[in-house]
Amino acid sequence: MSLYLDNAATSYPKPDAVYDAVNHALREIGVGPGRGVHRRGMAATRLVFEAREAVAALFGIADSSRVVFTHSATEALNLALFGLLLPGDHVVTTTMEHNSLVRPLHLLQARGVEVTWVEADRRGSVTPAQIAAALRPETKLVALSHCSNVTGSVQPIGEIGRATRSAGAHFLVDAAQSAGMMPIDAPALGIDLLAAPGHKGLLGPQGTGILYVAEGVELAPLMVGGTGGFSAGPEQPDAMPERLESGTLDTPGIAGLKAGVEFIRDVGIDVVAAKEQRLIASIVEGLAAMAGVTCHGPVPGEPRGGVASFTVAGMDSQEIGFRLDREYDISVRVGLHCAPDAHRTIGTFPGGTVRVSPGYFTSDRDVEEFLAALGEIVGRKQP
Ligand SMILES: Cc1ncc(COP(=O)(O)O)c(C=O)c1O
């Protein structure tokens, strides 16, 4: 039977309620929010408001108007970075980041923003002391991923948030690999900007994402245009979230995202996190027991998200992924995972790794099946 172990790219399958919610929004509501006083328009407006409330509650955010809907984590990161940074500003980040953070920062660097790339260790971790040492009086932002999509390393964002705040800088967290998989209380962690995709751990459809913008953080919009309300003037309204949300929202996507977030709320984020931890621990343990296999990233006992990346001596990662797919119908991700600097940091550039990422609907049996298939491939080595 087909086995999907690439939940770090996008979660699959989704809870049934997510499929139903998208279907309902398309068939029964049909229209976008804020665009009409008719009943359909009001239903869409209510749905989007409830989705914002559900997302806000998951991250401990009191005012849901500070949650902006985007189409991906990439868009959320671009909005945060281009909306905040000006030439002369200084940013601190790490060598473990996804291209969604790296590429906007490179472009901003070319436009006069200074960037310090803090070198993570070979297991993909940075310390709060390293970040604190990189801070300067002109540092405007510390930006990093909570959990690496390559190694699963979890950065100590609570301590980093405190150091950032005491230096007077803003703190942007890319929660692409942790949102919906680990408890995150954004205000308590000192997070000013939290970017997350809707389609990974939050269990929503592709085409959804969110950016939390803390009170007092002013972002310039990436786009301006129609916001439904505040229609009289030619200028973009100041009110949140309209200031940062132009154009008709993806109501079906947001309906699915709401259902995904409500599913997590109902199961309990601690239960979801515990399951993910158990599955990934069995995968790491199984990989460690296989001769010739190196599992990169945190060692057992160190914090790890729902990702395990490995290489096999004398075997190409692409070939392993291909054979898992063709011979066993098991989907994993191979290569650089859009994070070449992370691979340079851990020593797996340019060949990359095989990445396995279970999800909430992965079972212990699935993990056993994957390990057995890999054991056969590694045992045979040659086709
Ligand atoms: C750490 C990290 N940041 C950002 C992203 C980008 O997410 P999206 O595809 O929603 O733009 C990903 C996706 O893989 C990721 O793993």
Image: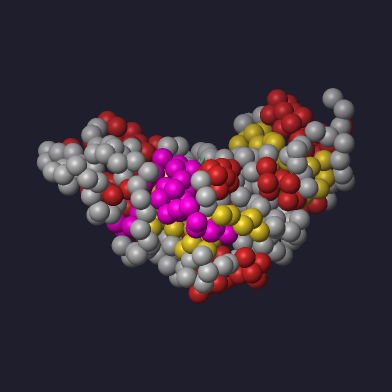
Figure check: 307 above or below 13? below
- Residue 267 position by quadrant: bottom left
Residue 74 within the magenta-colored segment of the rendering: yes
| Residue positioned 83% across, 51% down in the render | 289
Locate residue 145 relative to residue 255 in the image: left or right.
right
For the N terminus, give its image quadrant: top right
Percent position (x, y) of residue 37? Answer: 12, 41
| Nearest the eye: 263 or 219 | 219
Instruction: Report the image quarter containing ligand 1.
Output: top right
| Nearest the eye: 89 or 288 | 89
Does residue 339 appear in the picture of this structure? yes
- Residue 153 position by quadrant: bottom right
| Residue positioned 66% across, 37% down in the render | 333
| Nearest the eye: 12 or 347 | 347
Percent position (x, y) of residue 281? Answer: 69, 55
Q: Which residues are magenta?
A: 64-93
| Residue positioned 77% across, 29% down in the render | 319
